[in-house]
Image (cartoon, grey):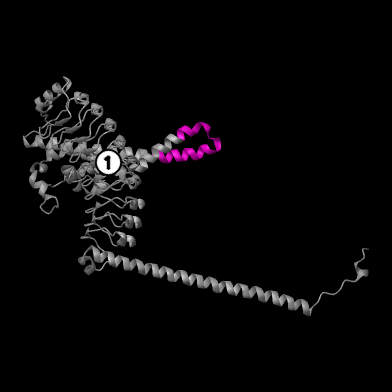
Amino acid sequence: MDPNPSRFPILSYVMDRLPSLGSKSPTATTAVISDLKSIHIGDPASAQSEIADQMPHLSDPKVIAAMRSAVADVAQTRSILTELGDRPDHESVDSAKAKLAAIEAARADVAETELRELAESEEECMAILQLEELHVAYEKLLKDAEERLVRIYRSAEVGDVEEEKEVDDVGDQVDEEVVRILQQALSGTGLDRVDLSDRGLRLLPEDFGRISGLVQLDLSNNELQVIPDTIGGLEKLEVLNLSTNLLEALPDTIGLLQNLKLLSVSGNKLAALPDSICHCRSLVELDVSFNQLTYLPTNIGYELVNLQKLSVQLNKLRSFPTSVCELRSLVSLDAHFNELRGLPLAFGRLTNLQSLNLADNFTDLTELPDTFGDLTNLKELDLSNNQIHALPDTFFRLENLIKLNLDGNPLVLLPPDVVQQGVGAIRVFMSKRWSDILAEEEKKSMLQVQEQEEAGWLTRSTSWLKDYVSGVSGYLSPKAPEDPILSQPL
């Protein structure tokens, strides 16, 4: 829950210097303000002395005083979230919303005896959604605080701690080429391809959504912060390149692009993808790499049935939704440099997968599911720089595997000399291991059968012995004949 140094360098630096920020006491805010007064920024022994050298004004007491309120707000919110727990994953949030809707629909027809159960379930769902809202608000708080600290520092550089506003309307001007293209398109001249890459654009006019014949649109390498909702009007669009801009969100109307086959939004600031992106069922290639994504849409696998290439590297994904296992057309998946903690159990359903990159998830990725061996068409696999201790026992089934990288993993079962010999030797080793496992299982099974047979023979012998003893007892002590006189009723 601490601010990420790469995204919030000043805020992270200041908070890292304040041990009391982890306090959960009611006086946490007071402690923060007190500690801020005693900060010595220029300590050469500090692990973050580099930023102090780059930003010497951080040692100015006036600058520290101006930053005080922002840091206090962040600290107070972080203290609350530390008690409440980590952010729920996207699937849990979607599931809670669905349950609440079902509860609301069923409430009128439920008997009074079941109302209590519904209330408890509703309370659990509300707790999940409230925790998600708190984490979303915390992310915004971090961003606002960092921006405020940057403005304060820039003011200090010019000798005034007061915030200064810079006015720059140049970027809001509509590019001449954009105007020319719009005039040409709206005059009746057909346009099917438009390339506006590398033009420093900050604004895309809403009228672009009226170029109904557009098939390819390249807006890469600009400074766009927003894509207008009208883009959903480009019904024939097949290729859309929005890479390397400043986008923080995509419009929900992107789901109206039913013919879209290639979408690239790489190199932006996206924290999430709209759920409506799943409606782009013609998508063959989706590149969302180098963003700030922590999850993928819950239904992405159920609806993008034609997707062949998925690039999600350089994000903050902690897990894949279970629906990703339904991407049966997927040929290439790149998820390196994330925070993946594992793969869905049914990951082996991706039987058309040929290239898989899970490198550099570092301490988070520790194991692979047993179904991994079902990826029989896999040709290239990169698992480097993770914490994988053992390959799944079914690994030997990957008969088409040509390239394999296991560097930087604390492998236990695989001998180093086998790893050095390459993928073929590893597959042979894992095949022998699998055979040994099967032999051991067969041995155990035979012992169990033998024990059951012996137990059955003993049971039959005991039963026969009981019958024999009973017969002998009857012969030695025959039942005396009844006396007819004694049998008469009184």
Q: Position of residue 394 (x, y in %)?
A: 33, 61
Q: Position of residue 229 (x, y in %)?
A: 24, 27
Asked which secondary structure carries label 1, the reply is helix
Which residue of the protein is positioned furthest toward the top in this rendering?
A: 187
Binning the other alpha carbons within 10 Å of mark 1 as few (below 14), some (14 to 19) or many (20 upward) gives many
Towards the viewer: 75 or 388: 388
Q: Main secondary structure of the magenta part?
A: helix
Q: Is residue 206 magenta?
A: no
Quarter in which the C terminus is drawn: bottom right
The amino acid type of the residue labelled 1 equals Gln
Towards the viewer: 23 or 5: 5
Q: State left or right for residue 156 relative to residue 395.
A: left
In which quadrant of the rendered view does residue 151 lie? top left
Q: Which residue matches tag 1?
A: 76
- Residue stretch rendered in magenta on the structure: 103-127
The image shows residue 324, relative to residue 213, as above or below, that is: below
Q: Is residue 126 magenta?
A: yes
